[in-house]
Image (cartoon, rainbow, N blue to C red):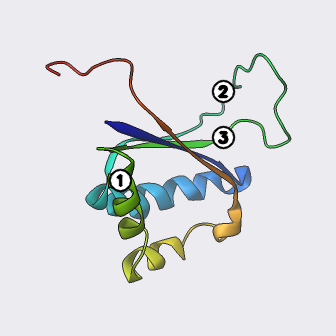
């Protein structure tokens, strides 16, 4: 199993509207097309950061995780899920437009904890 961890730095002033858009449109659509393990929006609580200082954007304020069988599954599944008229119509409604994504990070990880029964 491969996990894709997507961290977004979305315009903080539009985060409430983004949460409504994600909950009402993006998550229901994406959950039909990919195996969404979870989708999180930061709270107003201050993050805890140690080590090297961050850049001006600070911590990502949106994180979601997708499960894939492997990278080949992702290479086939992601473009299929994020193309087509239905997805384009949803993306066109993102608050402030796609330029509201100040940074998008996607990384791939494997779990060191095996699920029960594996």
Quickly name the residue at label 3.
60
Measuring from the top left, give residue 51's x and y in whole percent: 79, 17
Q: Position of residue 29 (x, y in %)?
A: 34, 63
Q: Nearer the viewer, mark 1 or mark 3?
A: 1
Upstream in the sequence, badge 3 or badge 2? 2
Residue at image position (49%, 61%) is 21
Q: Are marks 1 and 2 in contact (CB under 8 Å)?
A: no
User: 27 left or right of 49?
Assistant: left
Q: Horizontal and vertical percent for residue 85? A: 40, 83
Disc 1/disc 2 C-alpha distance (Å): 38 Å
Q: Position of 102 compared to 84: left or right?
A: right
Question: Looking at the image, is 13 positioned above or below residue 50?
Answer: below
Residue for badge 1 = 72
The residue depicted at 74 percent of the width and 21 percent of the height is 49
Q: Quadrant of the C terminus?
A: top left
**Residue furthest left as drawn:** 117
Query: Circle 3 — which element?
Result: loop
First in sequence: mark 1 vs mark 2: 2
Q: Residue at x 33, y 59 (%)?
A: 28
Disc 2 residue crowd, few under 14, some 14–19, many 20+, Cα 10 Å: few
Q: Circles 3 and 2: CB distance less than 8 Å?
A: no
User: Tag 1's secondary structure?
Assistant: helix
Residue nearer the viewer, 21 or 105: 105
């Amino acid at each position: 199993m491969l996990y894709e961890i997507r961290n977004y730095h979305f315009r903080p002033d539009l985060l409430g509207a983004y949460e409504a858009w994600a909950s009402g449109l993006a998550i229901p659509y994406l959950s039909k097309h990919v195996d969404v393990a979870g989708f999180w929006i930061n709270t107003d609580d201050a993050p805890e950061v140690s080590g090297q200082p961050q850049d001006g954007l600070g911590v990502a304020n949106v994180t979601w995780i997708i499960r894939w069988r492997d990278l080949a599954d992702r290479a086939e599944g992601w473009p299929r899920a994020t193309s087509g008229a239905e997805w384009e119509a949803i993306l066109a409604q993102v608050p402030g437009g796609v330029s509201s994504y100040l940074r998008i990070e996607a990384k791939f990880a494997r779990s060191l904890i095996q699920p029960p029964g594996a």
